[in-house]
Image (spheres, rainbow, N blue to C red):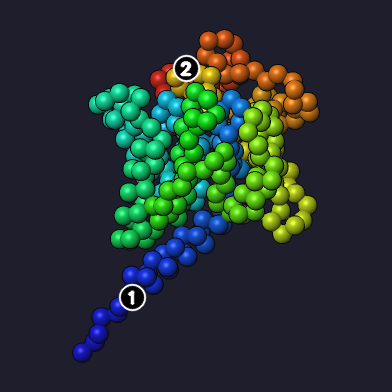
Amino acid sequence: MTMPFYVSPEQRYKENADYARRNIARGRPAVVLGYEGGIAFITENPSRSLHKVSEIYDRIGFAAVGKYNEFENLRQAGIRYADMRGYSYDRRDVTARGLANAYAQTLGAIFTESKPLEIELVVAEVGAAPDDDQIFRLSYDGSVSEQNGYVAMGGQAEQITTALSERWQPGLSLSEALRLAVEVLARDPAGGAPRELTPAQLEIAVLDRLRTRRAFRRLAGQLLERLLTLDDPTVDVPHTDERRPGLHDTLTGEDAPANGTENSDE
């Protein structure tokens, strides 16, 4: 008589966690950090169509690392959750905290019942003031942590977090925040010479607190080049306030929002 193969829950969860961490670490990292005017999302992504950073709702953004098909399914589910809640109740009832809790339940259930998702997520909401900003990091096992000011995930996340803890401070301008993020992303974890990351290799977006409703905007082209090469941080960088011309008026082509919603990326 053959005996059924038995694996203790502790061993199975440990193997699931090791499997997910190992595969997530192979991917390119992403950085989310606050700046004076909002929250910035920065990641290395040469693709112009497969986005790792996206809008979820009016003032909520999403960033992910890992397997694209897995986090894309969660991104779309988050959009449906936000649209349904905003339609059924009020748009103010859609919050990053509520969305993070919904994602945590899904990730936790999958982790305990089947193969874990090889992803990490950040859900961020920009507030009326920097103290009101919220950044939540979600791991493959459904654990949630609220971050203060910045977060890194993916490959070399620990080294990048250490570098950000030494350099990041509240009140950075957009240009300073973007250059700091690109600098830490370009570092060689082995201690060698840093790589050169060009704007074409980056996917960058912001949640701009000055916008009255839809805060999410992608940055690309000449504007992004200017922000990444600005030598004097005191030079005024145009705001993205909908009430006056500025950064959003510079966006053209694929960077300009389509009629309706940025969620048309899906």
Which residue appears at 57% of the width and 46% of the height? 152
Regarding residue 184, the answer to whether it shows in the image is no
Q: Residue furthest bottom?
A: 1
Kindly give the residue lying farthest to the left in the view shown.
1
x 36%, y 34%: residue: 79
Q: CA–CA distance between discs 2 and 1?
A: 54 Å
Q: Quadrant of the C terminus?
A: top left
Q: Where is residue 132? Give x, y as percent.
A: 49, 30
Q: Say which of 120 and 225 sits in front.
A: 120
- What SS does tag 2 mark? loop
Residue at image position (50%, 60%) is 21
The extreme front residue here reads 131
Considering only vertical position in the picture, is 160 above or below 245? below
Q: Vertical placement of 186 versus 129: above or below?
A: below
Q: Is residue 56 visible?
A: yes
Which of labels 2 and 1 is toward the front? 2
Instruction: Determine which quarter of the picture holds residue 37.
Output: top right
Give the crowd class for mark 1: few <14, some 14-19, many >=20 residues within 10 Å: few
Residue 79 located left or right of residue 40:
left
Callout 1: helix, strand or loop? loop
Left or right of residue 137: residue 221: right
Count residues near mark 2 (Cα–Cα under 10 Å), then give few for <14, some for 14-19, many for 20+: few
Three-letter code, disc 2: Thr
Identify the amino acid type marked 1.
Val
- Residue 61's spot in the image, x, y percent? 47, 33
Report which residue position mark 1 lands on. 7
Q: Position of residue 126 (x, y in %)?
A: 49, 29
Report the residue marked by disc 2.
Answer: 212
The quarter of the rendered structure image containing the N terminus is bottom left
